[in-house]
Image (spheres, rainbow, N blue to C red):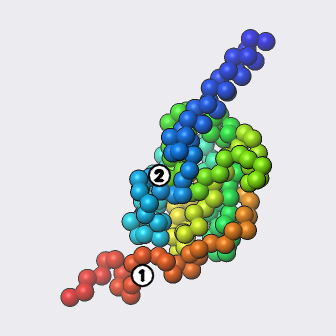
Amino acid sequence: SARDEAHQKLEAARRERLRMVIGQFGGITPARGQMGGSAPLSNRESAAQMQEALNKFITGYSSNLGMHSFLKGLGQLLEKQHRCSTVWRWVVIDESFTERGDERFVEEAIGLLMGFFRYFGPGDDNGIPLGSQGWDVEHSLSDRQIGRLLSICRKASNLDIAASGKLVDTGISRSNQDGALDEGQSICPEWCVVM
């Protein structure tokens, strides 16, 4: 019918828009899109930028009921990753982006994920099916940094709704779980001034 055909065209246009937004990042990440450089996430400034971006995103979408399953999926990814020695991947079907919100949501959600997580598109060798996208938690995030992100996501993790996506343990070892590579580890907190 004409209605089905119109719906198919609309969905095809939404998927193409999703591919374009991902393509704006060159289809790659590794957690640096938001910073515009190659600074590792163990850098204090980069970790603070990630916290700020996540807080802004969750605050901006937490009142929208249509986004709750997406927010919950993101929160559950970070919960799984915390205190786990291997990297977790979030596999999300395209409709979680294309049917949940407007173009602004697609741009902001993809910007957050491409900026701070490692992207994997669909392919036989990575277990991500066609019509889905995948993001790994950045390997260099320490449990301390993930704990800070979790404190931002607590509201989303407790929502009474099914989470978007599927969580997969990649089996890849994390490079900085204990925080040994975190910048600025000192006995004096940030607010401390040495006289």
Q: Nearer the viewer, mark 2 or mark 1?
A: 2
Query: Residue 9: x and y, percent?
Result: 68, 21
**Quadrant of image for the C terminus:** bottom left
Residue for point 73% across, 68% down? 171
Q: Residues within 10 Å of mark 2 (few under 14, many from 20)?
A: many
- Viewer-proximal residue, 96 or 58? 96
Q: Closer to the N terminus: mark 2 or mark 1? A: 2
Q: Which residue type does callout 1 highlight?
A: Gln
Mark yes or no: residue 154 visible: no
Residue for point 61% across, 52% down? 119
- Mark 1 lies on residue: 185
- Residue 19 picture quarter: top right
- Report the side of 53 relative to 68 (left or right): left
Q: Which mark is residue 5?
A: none
**Residue found at the far left of this picture:** 195
**Residue found at the far top of this picture:** 2
Query: Residue 99: x and y, percent?
Result: 65, 34
Vertical placement of residue 116 versus 70, above or below? below
Q: Which mark is residue 33?
A: 2
Vertical placement of residue 29 versus 141, above or below? above
Q: Residues within 10 Å of mark 1 (few under 14, many from 20)?
A: few
- Report the side of 7 relative to 116 (left or right): right
Residue for point 41% across, 70% down? 44
- Residue 190 picture quarter: bottom left
Residue for point 56% across, 75% down? 176
